[in-house]
Amino acid sequence: MPRPTSGTTSTFSNSDFITLNARIVTCKKCPRLISHCSEVAGTKRRAWLDWDYWGKPVPSFGDPLARLLILGLAPGVHGANRTGRMFTGDRSGDFLFRSLHRAGFASRPDSIHAQDGLELRDAWITASAHCAPPDNKPSPAELRACRPFLERELDLLAKVQVVVTLGRIAFDTYLSILKSRGAIERVSDFRFGHGVLFDELQPALLGCYHPSQQNTSTGKLTQEMLDEVFALAAKFIRSGPGPSAPRQSSQPSPPSRKR
């Protein structure tokens, strides 16, 4: 996909986003996760035997002038770990991108592979951990190791007005950064809840259940519930100042590809 466009009024350049994603993709801090991603890429799932799996840390992507930041947990082992793009190629992404499309943040309602033409508009997607973990459970140490990437993104994405956290772990990860920066006194002052908006924070924080297959198959999270979260985010954002320049979706690192 295209690289970030110019036009941002921040002091950061497009090369900062490219450099950050390059650091993410080449990170080797967590041997357990690197080994797991590589092993899965070698064995594959039967349905995807004809794919060249990405099999390494998955970069963030989206609009570099985004006013919406979406923070997930970690790449899906046969989704983003296969395709090389966040929330791409699995059921979680199916739910997420339908809602983003309906709210005007995505150019299409599905995310199949990294070269499918999808563009994010006014949104950026990242994760608390950039490697697919065994059983979808990164350890606290692995989350801490990945946190500097998120902190750098928060500095670069200077126009963000709303942060949507997908799940409790992403919610607590984001709040822990705010606490370390002196923006809040206690993480415990903020209770995670689906659709709960903390608009006293800048940017505002909006909790959301994670669109995991477990949550969506049991009905804990429905498509309508997810639609409502991003409709609320869009309403909050669009009631304020508009974007300062035309934007273009970005995937700074090379995507994985199908054979």
Image (cartoon, grey):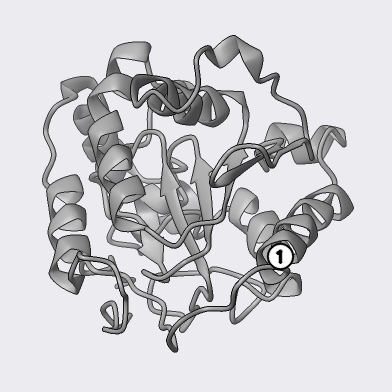
Which quadrant does the N terminus fall into? bottom left
Seen in the picture, residue 237 relative to 207 is either above or below; the reply is below
Name, please, the residue furthest toward the bottom.
Answer: 246
Residue 146's quadrant in the figure? top left
Residue at 49% across, 35% down: 73
Give residue 137's position: percent from left, percent from top. Answer: 46, 21
Give residue 26's position: percent from left, percent from top. Answer: 11, 46
217 lies left or right of 200:
right
Give residue 77's position: percent from left, percent from top. Answer: 43, 40
Residue under numbered circle 1? 234
Which quadrant does the C terminus fall into? bottom left
82 lies left or right of 88:
left
Residue at 35% across, 20% down: 180
Residue at 41% across, 34% down: 128
Seen in the picture, residue 9 relative to 25 is either above or below; the reply is below
Q: How many marks?
A: 1
Residue 143 in view, yes or no: yes
Which sits in the foreground, 111 or 171? Answer: 171
Give residue 143's position: percent from left, percent from top. Answer: 34, 23
Q: Please, what secondary structure does the residue beneath circle 1 have?
A: helix
Residue 49 in view, yes or no: no
70 lies left or right of 51:
right
Residue 107's quadrant in the figure? bottom right
Which sits in the foreground, 140 or 133? Answer: 140
Mark 1: give few (<14), some (14-19) or many (20+) Cα within 10 Å: some
Seen in the picture, residue 98 relative to 209 is either above or below; the reply is below
Residue at 75% across, 34% down: 215
Q: Give the residue type that dot 1 points to.
A: Ala
